[in-house]
Amino acid sequence: MSLLSDLLKELQQIKELSEKAIEAAENSQMLEELRVRFFGKKGTISQGILKKLGALSPDERPLLGEKANEVKTLLQEAMDRKNRRFLEEEESVFEESIRIDPTLPGARRMAGFEHLITKTQREMEDIFLSLGYEIAEGPEIENVYYNFETLNTPDWHPARDDQDSFYIVPDQWLLRTQTSPVQVRTMEKKTPPIAIISPGKVYRSDYDATHLPMFHQCEGLLVDTDVSVSHLKGTLEYFIEKIFGERKKIRLRPSFFPFTEPSFEVDVLWENKYGETRWLEVLGCGMVDPNVFRSVGYDSEKWTGFAFGMGIERIAMLKYRLTDIRDFIRGYAHFIRQDL
Ligand code: DAH
């Protein structure tokens, strides 16, 4: 046997073994290792074949060189083919991993929430709108005339002292202490029958667990002929059932407001989680005082009416069983999100 045929045989063996190794490679990394093993400086072809080229006669050399190159090209191609397959596989695995499933529920984004006061106010509005009431508005910077005088509260009246006011111009302009002036402003513009509510901000110089310097009230006014206390009570009973979501016992307790006569405070029979009951004060109301009708030029013999006023914070605190009114303005995220 000549050296040439030995080397050619060896080349053939290298080719077969290499093809098997390529076939067995499981990923592109293994292929890369094979590439080094075959074609690197210390690889099988260089070491096993090309290095021995010098031992051949000059006319034999080209033949072996040519064969070796052929084997090299074949192996190269086999590896390239296999590598392409690996790449395609890897690509499809990757694509699979990033594929979007349009049937999955979307990622939830935190949305804004209505503040409890806004929510409560809207619910109150809906209840009265369903009864045919309209919503009336008035200014927050109010004249003493509307805030007190036409409401039968002259400057000597002790009721003025109950409402520690923020004056803008002493004895003239103030931040309204109640929504009641909207009653008068509405009556000045309209002729009866009237049925309005007026929710909005009011201001008093007060601050503790049950008082805020700025809070919300909702005023109500109904003017018609032959309006009686039973209309008032029926309306409030209906409202309380709707706002608290269940029928509740209420009572009208005699009280005093300058602009209503008679006046009442309305208590609701409230049950705690142990089944104990207690009367809780919810709002003020009464039959419109004839003096108020006179101050807007209504015939107080002809027209009758009732009025009521309630704190929106108070309703919300009862409804959501809150104990500190200041929580409404603290801005705690969990409170605003309402996961109370
Ligand atoms: N304005 C009263 C207050 O702020 C609440 C009130 C009581 C309003 C009786 C009314 C009413 O309309 O009839 O304390």
Image (cartoon, rainbow, N blue to C red):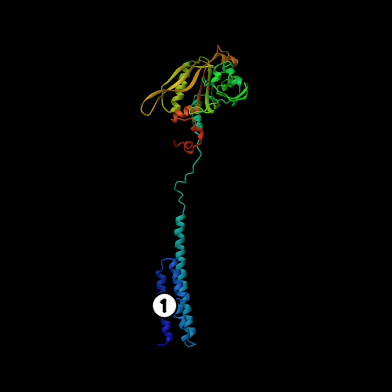
Q: Quadrant of the C terminus?
A: top left
Q: Residue at x 46, y 67 (%)?
A: 83
Give the residue at the far top of this rendering: 301
Q: Nearer the viewer, residue 72 or 205?
A: 205
Q: Is residue 171 above or below residue 319?
A: above
Q: Quadrant of the N terminus?
A: bottom left
Q: Position of residue 315 (x, y in %)?
A: 47, 27
Name the residue carrying label 1: 14
Q: Position of residue 16 (x, y in %)?
A: 40, 76
Confirm if mark 1 falls within 8 A of ligand 1: no
Q: Position of residue 24 (x, y in %)?
A: 39, 69
Q: SS at mark 1?
A: helix
Q: How many marks?
A: 1
Tell me if mark 1 has few (under 14), some (14-19) or many (20+) residues whose alpha carbon lies within 10 angstroms of its own.
some
Q: Is residue 34 above or below residue 248?
A: below
Instruction: Please state which amino acid type lies under the numbered disc 1.
Output: Ile
Q: Residue at x 37, y 25 (%)?
A: 276
Q: Position of residue 140 (x, y in %)?
A: 59, 27
Q: Is residue 78 above or below residue 50?
A: above
Q: Nearer the viewer, residue 244 or 22?
A: 244
Q: Residue at x 46, y 20 (%)?
A: 266
